[in-house]
Structure formats: structure tokens, C-alpha cells
Image (cartoon, grey):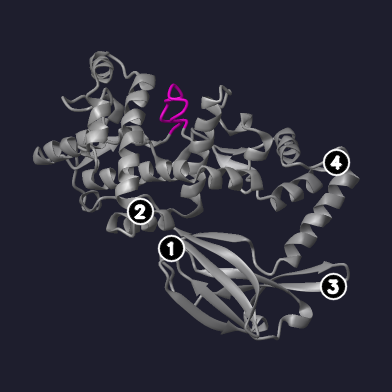
Amino acid sequence: MTNQVLQKLVEMRGVETQYVDAWGNPATISETSKAKLLQALGYDISNESVIAEQLDTEIATVWSQLLDPVCVQRTEDEKQIRLRLPLASVNTEYTVNIDLEEGESHTFTVIPVDQTLLNIGVVDDLEFHEYSIALPQELPCGYHGISLCEEQTVIAEMRYIVAPGACYQPEAIKAGKKLWGLSVQLYCLRSENNWGIGDFSDLAQLVTKAGKQGAGFIGLNPIHALYPSNPEACSPYGPSSRRWLNFLYIDVTALPEYNSAAVQAVVNAEEFQARLETARSVEYVDYSLVTELKMAALNSLFDEYYNAYLKKNSKQNREFKAFIKAGGESLVMQATYDAMQEYLQNDGKDAWGWPVFPENWRDFHNEAVAKFAKKHKKRVQFYMFLQWQAAEQLEKAN
């Protein structure tokens, strides 16, 4: 295989072959690494002719796509999209719809031949032209949608992502001032009221006290979702999701319905209090014990909340549904995953993660997963409820 053929296919797959290393020196990945990357992506690299065929297929696929599936640009970049069309279509007028993440929409028309021509390609004796289409207005940061229409019919769609050019900087830093703050592992915070692990109420107190002393920030460990049915998998750097929260940080005593008779019966039981005292007294966080205690209380609390509000058209139910809607498929996926892992663990299965789930449970979009979620609807709701309450408490601490 020639380096040229290999390099072209690597470029077609979007693999960066050059980078700046940790010492600031330019570096290039080896031919061996390129080949291994292509193999990992599913390509047959046994000989040059096979690679050339796959390269031709990739080229044909790109030219057959009117729009890229996704485009990522920084705020300072010129906002534009690439449009690929057969030569016979370049004089046609098209409508471009831009749907911003926040709900606002913009529309404009374009005739490709009047725009900047970038490339010309030929696939199966058919000539294609690629144009740069400038968007008529600046777009805010976010995940936006762009659709291309011909005579009111959508013929192509893409995701258009606008990202900040740099990480957030406080105004004081921009002005050249200095800030100080505290670096905190939230799980290490101890207070008279927490259950052997720092919680969001502890965080709120810390924020208030540090703020009064002039602190400008609190630096936290990752607080992403972990594995409630596998509590010893407790590293904050190995989350089940980076979008959702670790609800072990919920302050159970601050939740609605905590003072109900049913929940108080659970937490005031002699054995529960003895175990709670153990969780509070040990030097290091006992994740298994803390999880058992919190889940026992949360299960009882959710039953009370469910019967009081979620079975009715209550204000609380409407707020919960709004949270679920905002969370979208990602929230349902996370809650379903937690419910399935719990189900398997209770059944005595080794369910440390999705790779050991039953095969038809490993893809959220499989029918078997939908059937599970429907059958165990209340349990999935339970885990969504915990995400909701965790988000509410974190927001109050902010």
C-alpha cells in the first residue's frame, strides 16, 4: 500500500495525523498507527487495491451528501455551510432554514452557482460541485439545526454546532484581577447532618461561608452520574454519564416528603440509625453503606411523592414533566440504564456495565429496552426523579 492511498483514506475519515506534543514540538503519527486506526474503524487494509476501492466508496458517499451530517465552528469563525450538488442542480433556488437551539428560526434563499465554488468531483461520470454558503447572521453558541428545502420539501438536514472560542473566564480575570477559591472533593465534606458523604446542602453552606470570606470560586471534583447498583465503582473519573448527576450527593433530609410518616419510619428505625452512625463515623466514605441508606430512604420518599403528586395533575407533576421534556432522550436513557442495572443486580447477575447486559439490552433503541422501560415505568421514573432533585439542589447551591 502506498502512503498516498493510506493518507487519503485517513483524511477522509477525519483522523488528525499531526499534532503538537506536550513539549510544544510538532509530531506526526506513524504509518503503522494510521493503519491500525483504519482497522479499528472497520477497514480492510490487506492490500492496496482493496484500500483504493474503499477510498472510492468514501469519496462517492461524501459527494452524494448534499450537506455534512454535522458542522462544528467556533464563535469567531465565519458562519458557513458546504453544499454539494450535481452540476444540473446548481442553478436551482433553494430555501435554507436555521432552527436555533433556543427556538428562534431564520430562513433565506440561495442559488448555489452564485456562491463560492470550493471543489469539483466526478462520481460514476456525474459531475458534482461543492459550494460554500455563507449564513446571513451570526449564530449563538448551541446545537442548531439546518435544513435545505426545494419547493417546500426538505431534501437535506444537518446539525450545526457553535462552540465558544475559549473556556469561560470570570469578568475579574478578564480585567486582570486575581481570584482565590477552594478546591474541594465534595464526597469528603463532613457535617453534623450528612450521611457519611458530602452533599449539596454541605456545598451550599461551603459556598456561603467561603463567599463571605471573599472567595471567588469553588473548584469541585466531577459530580457526574455513577453506578447506584454498583456503588464501589465510585471513581468520579469513570462516570456512567457526564451529562447527569451523582444523586448520592442529594441531601435526603432536604427533600419534599422527608418528614412524612412513612419515610420517618424508615430512617428512625433502630437498625437504620445504627448503620447511619457507622457511615458518619468511619474515616473514609463507605460507598456501599451510604448507597444502601440513601436508597432505602429515597425509595420510601419517592413512593410518598408519587402518590401525593405524580399521580395527579399537580404543580409538582407539571414541573417534573417539564424536567423530563428538557432532559429528552438522554435523561430517559440514563434512567432506563440505572433501572436495568438494578434489575440485573437484584437477579444475581454480574451487571457492572452495559457490555455484560443481555445482548438485546445493550442498545437503547432496541425493542427489548423499550419493553423493559414500559414494564418498569415507575422505576424509570424513580431514577428520573432523583436526577431532578439532584439538579434542583445543585442549582440552589450555585
41 or 363: which is nearer to us?
A: 363
Disc on the earlier residue, 4 or 1? 4
Q: Secondary structure at mark 1?
A: loop
Pinpoint residue 236: horizontal percent, then vertical percent. Answer: 41, 30
Q: Amino acid at mark 3?
A: Leu
Q: Secondary structure at mark 4?
A: loop
Quadrant for residue 68, please give it: bottom right
Task: Please indicate, yes or no, whether residue 256 appears anywhere in the rendered image.
Answer: yes
Q: What residue does disc 1 label?
A: 76
Q: Amino acid at mark 4?
A: Met
Quadrant for residue 363, please give it: top right
Q: What mark, if any, has residue 126 been given in the picture?
A: 3
Q: Relative to residue 197, is residue 43 drawn left or right?
A: right
Q: Which residues are magenta?
A: 226-238
Residue drawn at (14%, 37%), measured in percent from left and top? 210
- Circle 4: is it few (<14), some (14-19), or many (20+) Cα within 10 Å? few
Does 150 sit above or below residue 286? below
Quarter holding the N terminus is top right
Pinpoint residue 256: horizontal percent, then vertical percent. Answer: 24, 43
Q: What residue does disc 2 label?
A: 320
Q: Amino acid at mark 1?
A: Glu
Q: What residue does disc 4 label?
A: 1
Task: Estimate the spatial distance between the alpha carbons at disc 3 and disc 4, rounded to whole Å.
Answer: 28 Å
- Circle 1: is it few (<14), some (14-19), or many (20+) Cα within 10 Å? few
Quadrant for residue 348, please give it: top right
Q: Relative to residue 178, is residue 121 drawn left or right?
A: right
